[in-house]
Image (cartoon, coloured by chain):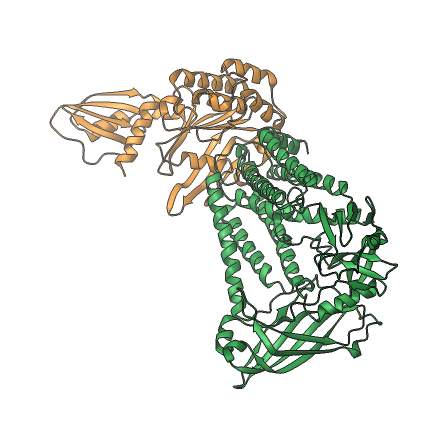
Chain colours: A green, B orange
Amino acid sequence: MNQTIHHLKKDVRYFRYFLAGWFLLILLRAALLQAVDPTVNVRSRFSFEMTLAVLTGLQLTAAVGIIAQLIQNDPLVSTTAFWLTRPVSRRILLAAKSVFVLLFLIAVPLLAQSALLLLNGIALGDFFWLSLESVLKLGVLFIPIMVVAALTPNLSKFIVAGTVTILAVILGHIALMLWTDRLDWPKGSLTLNFSQTLAAYLLAVFFGLVVIVVQYLFRRTARTAVLAVLALVLVVATASLWPWDFFQPRERPLEESFDLGSVSVAVDFSRSYVRPGGGLPEVMGELKISGVKPGFVVSPIEVRPTVRFKEGTAVESRVIHSFSSSEVAPLLDQRHRAISEALGQVKLVGARPAEWPHTGLAIFNQDQFERYKREPGRYSAKIEFQVLKYQIAGELPLRKNARYDRGSAHAAIESVNSGSRSCVVTVRQSNPAIPWLDFFSQPQEVRYLLRNKATKEALLGPNYAFYFYNYTRMDWPLGLMIPSFRPLSRRSTLTFGSAEVPAGAIDSSWFGNAELVRLEVVTAGRFSRTVQADNFVMDRNEAR
Amino acid sequence: MSADQDRIHSIETEGLTRSFGRTEAVIDLTLAVPRGSIFAFLGPNGAGKTTTIKMLMNILRPSAGKATVFGVDSSRLGPEEFRQIGYVSENQDTIDWMTVEQLIAYCKPMYPTWDDALCGSLLRQFDLPPDQKIKNLSRGMRMKAMLLSSLAYRPRLLVLDEPFTGLDALVRDELVRGILELTQQEQWTVFISSHDVDELEGLADWIAVVNKGRLQLSESLASLQSRFRSVQVVVEGDEGLPPARPAEWMLPEKAGHTLRFVHSRYREGSEDQIRAMVPQSGRITAHPMSLRSIFVALARTYRISE
């Protein structure tokens, strides 16, 4: 232990100025995330994102430089290193280097992140899982850097080897994607993608540590490099081909109050079209769902169609839907009814009707599309649905400083400005979501409304769906780097009442008796149905 | 005294071989370094000296054969053994960013036998500035710093790989004196490699010569100097070199009426052998040789015999 500390002290002395810079970057980032509100206006958001990007770049460069130099100050690929002929145990050297990385490059950023999270009222359970996730992601970032540094003799070769490794990972990933596409490998669901990424991360950390330990203990660079390459291949393959979806939520039995027998589902391609924009050709048709009991929303999550053409060929595909993207009729109508039901059968004043009646019902690769786009076919599909319903998470009096607190989720009204036909409410919210581990226990949608109990009416916010959760960067290891990339708290300006509200329906006294209601969507189960249609043509315009 | 301290040899190698691809750097090297000796490991550049030392120090693995240091297989040398070994090499990396004082402070806790008094004395003897960074020192001063950090814990074995290369005569003399003083007091074994025999004149008491990876000789300086003679034979006639010469006649040449060669196995009765080989021989003189002359004779012979 004494010897480990002795070697650690030597490295700390060498890196003292670099570490000071590193700590400064962490402090700057923490201060930026805590003090700056990126949602004030577009310019502040742009400045915030730019500053964060620059800090991230600097942190990444600093981390790579410090780790590479740390390892190569006592190089393993060398016959001239000072330590080789001194009484320095390889185990102790490895321990000293590991403690340095753990202490300064992982623990310190984690401490800064913890301070921010606790300052923003994170629940202890969430704090634990978020910290664990952060350690994993930092490990995934730092351990491969340590591996490359341990297998190269100097910084220039480290840069070359690192660049080659990154290119190999990217090319390997692309090759696997093309290969699986050609083999018609089943496309992953969102949860399977999470499972694959987590499995790949765990393997990367495990094999990375094995490679580092082997290189330190045996210093057989060529053999260890072969081991590292094999591990890299395994990790890249796992990220694309890992089959076990351990994140898949357990099947939840349908709520008894949901009357499945009365639900009927049909598809209609009489006014279908190919979704505009890039990507694979996706055929948009009408999904007709009827008989849904008020209070529930039936939302497709997966469509597995088979199209049979006259010549006898069958083409299969798979379309994954998310709740957020299914803002189509009749889902919108169902949602309106479900919200109304959740609020006590209130009338939704000025709720806008559905503008987008079509949904993606089949997706093809370019070859299939070119070949069959004019051919009429018989469409059949198994559609997996999730049943959702809204529930009231919180009711806040419509005044400044009214609060909502539950677990790590917090919201406080900062200001209320009501006029004769509209009301602007500013809410500051914080909710440090945990993408992997908490994703499926988080509500899929959070929505604010104004409810007037006396008139039994409610007003929706300007955006039909309000998503606070920022999952867009969940797979990016830097997302949680030093500290959380995700803004910890954000201010939302909610405007209630608009041109769509009929004249005379709302006035200032209406707002005087209103309260702010926070609604969350919860899952009430799943079911699947098989549908058929004879009028299918991939590209109806071409067919004409 | 422990069993390994009772050993006669501090270093032993047996059939030690190391190849780099198709190049054989060290071939079937078998030698023994007597405990307490100052063992000069001589050879021209590229002879395999550094590779041998790196195998002895567990920096490189042998392709074949084995080496032991203090009776421990060299591929298993660890901290326990390195606490008793001092190693200084012209190729060794130094911790450039440290000052001399910091280097001492860094090395000291690794050695239970570190002697502060000896360290202070060496610091003064080598005239090392404690607050100077190693990277700002001259090459000679840097070698002195490395030597200090390898001597202050009184190692039982001191391995020096071309320690004097590029040093001026004054610095070299200081280093040699420093090594000699300590080894005479402490009965340390010193294994020192060099391509320049002048550096080791008056220092070594045991000599090994290696050429093209192969050991050519290994014996005590006293034995070597007793058997090597520079021989001059006055020949009374016009005969050339005798066609069938013994192998121990090295570098024979004839200039005018004088035949000169180095006799590598000179003993009583060698004069009679010479007269038998050169019937017209007149006066024969045989002079003892310096280590440098012996080494040059050996080196030239090996090149000639390629």
User: At which x and y percent is residue A533?
Assistant: 63, 82
Quadrant hosting residue B229: top left
Q: Is residue A162 above or below residue A172?
A: above
Q: Is residue B30 above or below residue A202?
A: above
Residue lying farthest to the right in this orientation: A454
Q: Is residue B125 above or below residue B90?
A: above
Quadrant hosting residue A184: bottom right
Residue visible at 58% across and 45% down in the picture:
A212
Left or right of residue B259: residue B31 = right
Residue visible at 66% across and 44% down in the picture:
A38
Q: Quadrant of the N terminus of chain B?
A: top right
Left or right of residue B189: residue B253 = left
User: At which x and y percent is residue B183?
Assistant: 51, 20
The answer to whether residue B83 shows anywhere in this view is no
User: At which x and y percent is residue A204?
Assistant: 60, 52
Left or right of residue A415: residue A485 = left
Along the viewing direction, whichever of A365 and A429 lies nearer the viewer: A429
Residue lying farthest to the front in this orientation: A504
Left or right of residue A65: residue A304 = right
Along the viewing direction, whichever of A460 and A69 lies nearer the viewer: A460
Q: Is residue B266 above or below residue A279?
A: above
Along the viewing direction, whichever of B192 and A62 lies nearer the viewer: A62
User: At which x and y percent is residue A450?
Assistant: 80, 56
Along the viewing direction, whichever of B40 and A13 lies nearer the viewer: A13
Quadrant hosting residue B130: top right
The answer to whether residue A493 shows anywhere in this view is yes
Q: Quadrant of the C terminus of chain B?
A: top left
Q: How many marks?
A: 0
